[in-house]
Image (tube, rainbow, N blue to C red):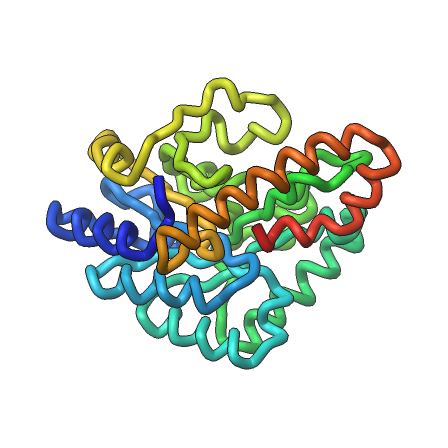
Amino acid sequence: MVFVYTEWERFCKSLADNNIHSIPAMSVNKSTEKYLVLKHDVETDVSKALVLARIENKYGHKGSFYVQAYLLDNERNVSMLREIQEMGHEVSYHHDVMDSCGGDLELAAKEFEKNRNKFADNGFDIITVCQHGNPIINRIGYTSNRDFFRSDSVRQQYPFISDIMVNFKELRQTEYAYYSDAGHHFKLIYDPLNNDIVDSDDKNIPYKGLDALFEVLSDGNCIISTHPHRWMKSRVLYVLRVAFFKIVKKTVKLVSKIPFIKKILSRYYYLAKKI
């Protein structure tokens, strides 16, 4: 699988040609007939998210773009996100408040509310959200950012917000298959709501490309999750990027076995967003 814009455009066109159109996650409810959600975790480069949004809009698709809050501190990013929203896409929050607050739920709740207001002040209503994974962080006393919406107090405070990876199925009364491009290739994620608690990597089903993924979309409701910063114009540049990614990944896995180094890496987990 090569993550280049021409491939995404070909995929979006194939969907439209077969009368399949993505809807935003916020539009899903118990009465929604078979649906597809094109979901994007925007962690660094908003301009790349805009490219995907324009491609999807060209073929009548409306996706969900989950954006990390720090990106709203840049006016150019806000302008691009408003353009994405004006196309009919959902622009919402890709949160990692448990990690940024060291697992302290009270501090995490304050940060979430602060960022929710930041989104609202810029014209983005928070209806659905998605947690960020942070693969290299060292967690003590909590499992992942999903623990935020696993909290009864948080869910009582935000009964109108559903986290894709926690309570979306419950609040929207729906079932779906979840496909992710994590690791630079698409795969069906086994038990996406709990795979941070139970190691289920060996049960994930890989797909060699978008054509293979397209073949299974008729089976039922689907959410396809991408990371826009991984998509590129050139196949050559993408191949070089993946080679760099694999080198970094192997190096991090090796050195993280050293406790002291693991603590340092954990402090700089945000660097993982860049690759």
Q: Nearer the viewer, residue 165 or 60?
A: 60
Q: Is residue 218 left or right of residue 163?
A: left
Q: Quadrant of the N terminus?
A: top left
The residue located at (40%, 30%) in the rendering is 188
**Is residue 185 shown left or right of residue 143?**
left
Q: At 46% from the left edge and 40% from the top edge, which residue is drawn?
A: 184
> Which residue is painted at 80% across and 49% down in the image?
267
Q: From this view, report whether residue 110 is shown above or below residue 10.
A: below
Is residue 146 visible in the rendered image? The answer is no
The x, y position of residue 11, in whole percent, is: 24, 48
Residue sitting at x 45%, y 30%:
189
- Disc count in the image? 0
Question: Of residues 243 and 156, which is closer to you in this image?
Answer: 243
**Hey, which residue is sitting farthest top in the picture?**
202
Please say whether residue 263 is visible from this viewpoint.
yes
Q: What percent of the width, then of the height, locates residue 103?
A: 78, 44
Q: Position of residue 223 (x, y in %)?
A: 37, 42
Residue situated in front as seen by the camera: 210 or 6: 6
245 to 109, vertically: above or below: above
Q: Is residue 270 left or right of residue 7?
A: right
Percent across and percent down for residue 58 are 22, 65
User: Nearest the camera: 3 or 91?
Assistant: 3
